[in-house]
């Protein structure tokens, strides 16, 4: 009898974990979150992490980088997962209540944004290695 109870506990715990991870996946339409008429601010950290080695510039609307980012956004609307973790990235892109964080040759990306209800969200997605390297140029 104790063996059956222990087995049932395992099944329940695994089911709860599976439901939690499946339930955390969401679709994300970045093109609706990013203001299409405002530039983005890009901050790139150097490997030395010295404040003097931080590069800050603007990604202008309709620039090549802007268009590549919107292309990434339109091609990556599914499989985003909620994450409570804190991240330290190689670069981040920001605009009002939106921030994208990534890593050089990274295999994931993190998005922070505030939705239309004023709710803060942080989502992550697995991507191809280096898929967003154009953001570091």
Image (cartoon, grey):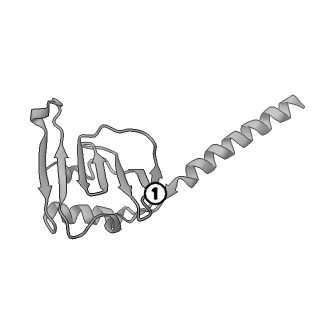
Q: Is residue 84 above or below residue 62?
A: above
Q: Is residue 48 above or below residue 55?
A: above
Viewer-nearest residue: 86 or 18? 86
Residue pictured at 23% horizontal, 40% vertical: 90
The residue furthest left is: 52
Residue pictured at 35% horizontal, 39% vertical: 87
Residue pictured at 30% horizontal, 51% vertical: 100
Within 10 Å of the Cα at label 1, are there few (<14), some (14-19), or many (20+) other Cα atoms? some
Identify the image quadrant of the N terminus. top right
Image location (x, y in percent) of residue 6: 79, 32
Q: State how many labels appear.
A: 1
Residue at numbered disc 1: 79
Image location (x, y in percent) of residue 48: 15, 29
The residue furthest right is: 1
Image location (x, y in percent) of residue 93: 23, 52
Image location (x, y in percent) of residue 112: 36, 51
Left or right of 83? Residue 62 is: left
Viewer-nearest residue: 10 or 89? 89
Left or right of 91? Residue 75 is: right
The residue furthest front is: 118
Viewer-nearest residue: 126 or 16? 16
Q: Is residue 28 above or below residue 110?
A: below
Residue pictured at 47% horizontal, 50% vertical: 82
Secondary structure beneath dot 1 equals: loop
């Amino acid at each position: 009898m104790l063996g059956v109870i222990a087995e049932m506990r395992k099944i329940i715990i695994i089911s709860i974990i599976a439901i939690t991870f499946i339930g955390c996946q969401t679709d994300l339409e970045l093109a609706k979150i990013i203001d299409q008429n405002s530039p983005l601010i890009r901050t790139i950290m150097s490997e030395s992490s010295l404040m003097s080695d931080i590069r800050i510039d603007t990604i202008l609307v309709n620039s090549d980088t802007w268009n590549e980012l919107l292309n990434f956004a339109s091609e990556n609307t599914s499989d985003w997962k909620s994450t409570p973790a804190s991240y330290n990235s190689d670069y981040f892109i920001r605009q009002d209540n939106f921030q994208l964080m990534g890593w050089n040759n990274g295999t994931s990306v993190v998005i922070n944004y505030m939705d239309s209800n004023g709710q803060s969200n942080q989502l992550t997605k697995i991507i191809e290695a280096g898929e967003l390297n154009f953001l570091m140029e």
